[in-house]
Image: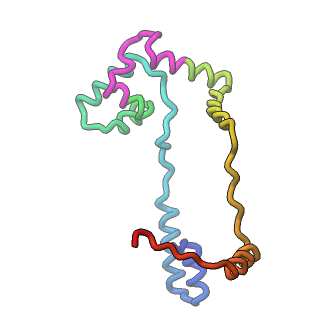
Amino acid sequence: MTTLKEFEEALKTAGNDAALDILDKLRERDRTNRSIRPARRVVGKKMTPELARRILELHQTTNMTQQEIAFDLGVNQGRVNEVIKRGKWLSDDPNAPEAIARDRAIKRAKEGVGISPRKAPRQPPAPAGPQKAEPKAVTRKRAEKTKAKDKDRPVQLLLGGL
């Protein structure tokens, strides 16, 4: 696929000034129409039962998508899904799995520490006993020697059940 820059270079090479003028006008139009829009990625608020109830209320009373609800309330879309589909965050129980996970993540973020990666599983020990040797690669010289030896050998024809 050709990039716009490559296309522009091809127009210059071909001396197509009319097309280059059109390209410049389109670029200028795009510059004037550009606007800075708010980012779609939102750093989530702390989930509370009140916020979860607001999510459910918006879900039941509007035609908003989960993404729209998340953006409107300033939470992650995954959290909206958890509330709607699994009923999470509706209780104020600090021992609920989601509350424990949230508190651990907050603590790690404050400490600037991530979870260490899992260790790779250990490889099983090699079986004791004789190991089969890998077949050697056949070189051209060795193949030629073998052919020369085979010429001198008598050929035996095996005729199975005849």
Closest to the observer, 122 or 150: 150
* Residue 129 sits above or below residue 36 on the image: above
Name the residue at 38% across, 21% down: 51
Position of the C terminus, as image quadrant, is bottom left
Name the residue at 28% across, 30% down: 59
Tell me where residue 75 appears, x and y as whole percent: 44, 30
> Range of the magenta residues?
81-103
* Residue 1 sits above or below residue 124 on the image: below
Tally of numbered discs? 0
Tell me where residue 94 appears, x and y as whole percent: 46, 10
Closest to the observer, 38 or 96: 96
Q: Looking at the image, which residue sits at the far bottom? A: 15
Name the residue at 68% across, 36% down: 128
Closest to the observer, 32 or 115: 115
Closest to the observer, 12 or 148: 148
Task: Judge whether residue 99 is colored magenta.
Answer: yes
Q: Is residue 116 left or right of residue 57?
A: right
Q: Is residue 159 left or right of residue 11?
A: left
* Residue 38 sits above or below residue 6 on the image: above
Q: How is the image coloured?
A: rainbow
Q: Looking at the image, which residue sits at the far front? A: 162
Tell me where residue 89 appears, x and y as whole percent: 39, 19
Q: Is residue 24 left or right of residue 118?
A: left
Name the residue at 69% across, 43% down: 130
Quarter residue 3 falls in: bottom right
Q: Is residue 61 left or right of residue 141?
A: left
